[in-house]
Image (spheres, rainbow, N blue to C red):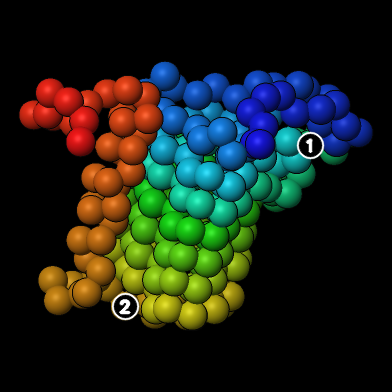
Amino acid sequence: MGFTGPNVLTSFNNDVNKPVIAKSSFVHDLASVIGDVKLGERVYVAPAASIRGDEGQPIYVGNESNVQDGVVIHGLETMEEGKAVEKNQVEVGGKKYSVYIGDRVSMAHQSQVHGPALVGNDVFIGMQALVFKATVGDGTVLEPGAKLVGVKVGSGKYVPAGSVITKQADADALPAITGTYAFKDLNKAVVHVNTQFADGYNGKKPAGQGHGH
């Protein structure tokens, strides 16, 4: 079984926090959400996913995002001996985070977002992709197996399958999403599916349906 509950006291974290999960979100019994984690509205967390805000914290996952099977969200320690480790934090709206994931983000099967990391809105993180010490702009697509380490990727870009991007010059040279890009509408479709999972597991019937099938 998974575990949803508080972190433990450690030498690097003197605070015990429980996850804050919106009622419209759903965390599967086989998933774990631990410590200083906040899930927005209609977030779906699938079996075997792990969102662990016990070392790097806080972790935020925005509205209508999805955390699919086997996904790991974690971060490097953000506190040491009661002092903030700023190099392991990202800042959004004047607040510091270990991991910040925006709205309508899809984290596909076995992908990893490891803090310090900032992911914008409407981003697709493909199967077995990695974001570590990186920033991802709005509307960007990481194709399966793509890896971003220590770079900032702008909005509306795509990272080809299997690419390993560790130099900022390579991140700056990533191609822009155009009307002919094969996966330009993929995230919208994935969000549509997974928000319905959140609704359905919470007992909400699909629009226009009086009963289940």
Residue 36 visible from this viewpoint = no
- Residue at 41 percent across and 44 percent down: it is 66
**Residue 96 drawn at (x, y percent):** 59, 35
User: As rendered, which of 50 and 79 lies closer to the eye?
Assistant: 50
- Element on which disc 1 rests: strand
**Horizontal and vertical percent for residue 55?**
75, 40
Residue at (60, 66) in percent of width and height: 150
* Image position of 48 with respect to 7: above or below: below
Q: What amino acid is labelled 1 in the image?
A: Met
Question: Toward which corner of the image does residue 112 lie, by quadrant?
Answer: bottom right
Question: How packed is label 1: few (under 14 Cα within 10 Å), some, or many (20 or more)?
Answer: many
Mark 1 or mark 2, which has the lower sequence index? Answer: 1
Q: Residues within 10 Å of mark 2 (few under 14, many from 20)?
A: few
Is 149 left or right of 24, judged from the image as shown? right
Q: CA distance from mark 1 to mark 2?
A: 37 Å
- The image quadrant of residue 102 is top left
- Front one among 208 and 128: 208
Which residue is painted at 17% across and 25% down in the image? 211
Residue beneath label 2, please? 175
Q: Name the residue that disc number 1 marks.
A: 79
Of residues 42 and 113, which is closer to you in this image?
A: 42
